[in-house]
Image: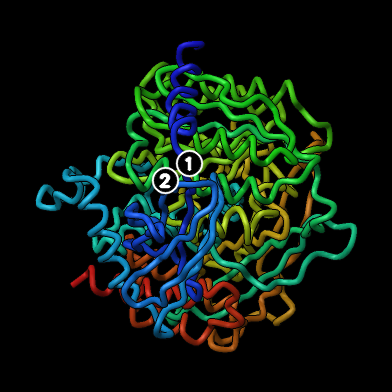
């Protein structure tokens, strides 16, 4: 282990002793997307570099301060004065209002080709081109209510599938069916359901409408909104960054992007917070002991000094990270391991089943888990998704700088601060009104109907202000009953982050329904996202649904669209059309 740490210090520290550098990320001032291919030049010097496919660069400067000139076709040139070891986030203003997402995708692909000659051998087909693993999911079927009125599943707000699908579409590649987890697509977006009343952890909402793709069916949407913590009342953080620096992380869309993501997180830390960093390749090592959030320069230096090389000892690293988190445990605080990796473990325990058992043992410590996936080609989605679900955790896939900003800046509170854990939903349908039902998505989270909260069937977590949405497609009975009849009863069970007692939120869903076009914008947009997921999965239940229907529904339900994520969804639908041709 000592040799490993010395190597890490040598890799980063040796460079810093000999040269003066600045690093940074460049993004579009309107879309906040990373800008690749930007020439970064030191004025009055010959030194220049180009931002990689994710807008990242690092450049040596000749003295303690210097002026950089940034130029890129389609953008206004920009000069910026920098000081040694600055870590910058720079915005470039486009010459025109709209940035062409297809052209941007082509530029990214071109940069990846130039940095990796083995990249993009598409003639081999998707399965050999991407040596990626996804857990097999079988689409939920219709269930007869008379025989099985109770539907039980674990609730969470993982969103990794959406950004991963976006990555495939930008590369103009077919999306693997098992990469499409519809609930993670739906829950990627913000929904404007009211926050719960004061003193309550969560609030329950529902919509019951006609079904756009099958007119004889209906749709039930159930939404759970968690209370939002005030920024000044966030509990203290005890974070352990568990960072994969193995050889597989050496490409531009992995370790450099990972470093940029953690810089964003570090900039949001407070003096009461503390961070330790465990880096692992062939064996793990403590790169940074627990350090106060007011020592940002020290934390950032440790992140900057990371370099990739070696095999991947995930088992030993996870144990070490949890041990440190337990040693530094903050009662009533946010105690969390943040694992950042492509998931390609190959030393010690490595199978999905073995890693699940390891995480189940560690979760009893009360330490939560956040999994961040990076990269492509050997990305192991199945492993990270499993770790997050078994470890009272959440899961995101970071495909670019904007996604890092979304997770660690715009949604800092909901990403890191948990309101409820082990969250499970029971929906009991009225067989007099519901002939059969089908849960859309959540395939790998469906639980036995007699489930109670316990280790082998743990639920998910919901963060501060989060909204979790579930959709059912329903075949109604022919019986006409009064509008005030109950369609279903919902019971949500969960635990508070630091409590073992089970809490409940319940409510009745009335049978009164409305036409789909009269439903709220949130309901209609979530339905459009679900239908796109069904199209990508080549679902047998799409009925008359296609990308044209998705586009029409989503375009008419954009709402406020803070962050323009719904507008981006429309662009993704267009990309699906191009890939399907």
Return the residue nearer the eye: 488 or 176: 176
Residue drawn at (61%, 51%) of the image: 155
> How far from the left and from the top, in percent, is residue 480?
61, 81
Q: How many labels does the image show?
A: 2
Q: What element carries label 1?
A: loop
Residue furthest top in the image? 2
Relative to 75, say whether 195 is above or below: above
Residue drawn at (41%, 77%) of the image: 76
Residue drawn at (58%, 20%) of the image: 320
Q: Are marks 1 and 2 in contact (CB under 8 Å)?
A: yes
Quarter of the figure with the C terminus: bottom left
Relative to 299, say whether 482 is above or below: below
Relative to 454, say whether 424 is above or below: below
How far apart are the two marked residues, 1 and 2, measured between alpha carbons?
6 Å
Return the residue nearer the eye: 574 or 179: 574
The label shown at residue 20 is 1
Return the residue nearer the eye: 461 or 32: 32
Return the residue nearer the eye: 406 or 189: 406
Q: Is residue 305 left or right of residue 116?
A: right
The label shown at residue 142 is none
Residue drawn at (54%, 44%) of the image: 85
* Category of crowding for the residue at label 1, using alpha-carbon neighbours closer than 10 angstroms: few (below 14), some (14–19), many (at least 20): some
The answer to whether residue 219 is visible is yes
In the picture of the structure, the residue carrying the numbered disc 2 is: 60
Give residue 296's quadrant in the image.
Answer: top right
Q: Is residue 536 left or right of residue 266?
A: left
């Amino acid at each position: 282990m000592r040799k490993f740490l010395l190597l890490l210090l040598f890799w980063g520290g040796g460079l810093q002793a000999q040269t003066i550098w600045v690093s940074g990320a460049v993004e579009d001032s309107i879309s906040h997307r990373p800008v690749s291919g930007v020439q970064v030049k030191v004025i009055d010097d010959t030194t220049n570099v180009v931002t990689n496919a994710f807008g990242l660069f690092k450049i040596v400067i000749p003295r303690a301060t210097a002026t950089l000139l940034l130029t890129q076709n389609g953008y206004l040139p920009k000069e910026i004065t920098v000081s040694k070891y600055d870590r910058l986030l720079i915005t470039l203003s486009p010459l025109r209002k709209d940035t062409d997402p297809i052209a941007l995708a082509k530029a990214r692909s071109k940069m990846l080709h130039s940095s990796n000659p083995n990249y993009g051998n598409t003639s081999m087909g998707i399965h050999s081109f991407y040596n990626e693993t996804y857990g097999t999911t079988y689409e939920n079927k219709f269930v007869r209510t008379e025989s099985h009125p109770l539907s039980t599943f674990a609730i969470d707000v993982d969103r990794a599938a959406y950004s991963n699908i976006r990555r495939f579409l930008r590369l103009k590649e077919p999306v693997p069916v098992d990469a499409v987890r519809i609930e993670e697509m739906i829950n990627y977006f913000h929904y404007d359901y009211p926050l719960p009343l004061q003193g309550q952890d969560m609030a329950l909402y529902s919509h019951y409408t006609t079904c756009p793709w099958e007119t004889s069916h209906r749709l039930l949407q159930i939404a759970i909104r968690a209370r939002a913590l005030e920024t000044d009342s966030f509990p203290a953080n005890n974070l352990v960054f568990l960072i994969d620096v193995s050889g597989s992380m050496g490409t531009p869309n992995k370790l450099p992007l990972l470093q940029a993501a953690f810089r964003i997180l570090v900039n949001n830390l407070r003096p009461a917070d503390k961070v330790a960093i465990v880096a692992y390749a062939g064996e793990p090592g403590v790169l940074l002991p627990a350090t106060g959030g007011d020592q940002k320069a020290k934390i950032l230096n440790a992140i900057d000094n990371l370099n990739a090389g070696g095999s991947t000892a995930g088992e030993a690293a996870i144990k070490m990270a949890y041990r440190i988190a337990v040693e530094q445990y903050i009662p009533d605080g946010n105690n969390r391991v943040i694992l950042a990796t492509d998931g390609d473990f190959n030393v010690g325990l490595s199978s999905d089943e073995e890693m699940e058992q390891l995480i189940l043992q560690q979760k009893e410590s009360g330490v939560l888990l956040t999994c961040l996936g990076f990269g492509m080609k050997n990305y192991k989605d199945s492993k990270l998704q499993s770790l997050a679900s078994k470890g009272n955790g959440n899961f995101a896939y970071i495909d670019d700088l904007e996604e890092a900003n979304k997770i660690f800046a715009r949604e800092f509170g909901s990403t890191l601060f948990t309101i409820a854990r082990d969250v499970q939903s029971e929906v009991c349908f009225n067989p007099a009104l519901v002939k059969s039902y089908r849960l859309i998505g959540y395939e790998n989270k469906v639980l036995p109907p007699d489930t109670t909260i316990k280790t082998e069937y743990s639920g998910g977590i919901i963060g501060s202000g989060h909204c979790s949405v579930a959709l059912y497609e329903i075949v109604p009975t022919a019986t006409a009953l009064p509008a005030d009849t109950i369609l279903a009863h919902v019971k949500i069970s969960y635990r508070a982050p630091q409590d073992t007692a089970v809490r409940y939120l319940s409510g009745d869903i009335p049978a009164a329904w409305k036409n789909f076009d009269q439903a709220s914008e949130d309901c209609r947009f979530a339905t459009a996202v679900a239908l796109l997921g069904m199209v990508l999965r080549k679902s047998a239940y799409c009925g008359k649904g296609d990308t044209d229907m998705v586009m029409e529904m989503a375009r008419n339900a954009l709402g406020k669209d803070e962050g323009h994520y719904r507008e981006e969804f429309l662009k993704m639908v267009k990309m699906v059309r191009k890939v399907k041709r």
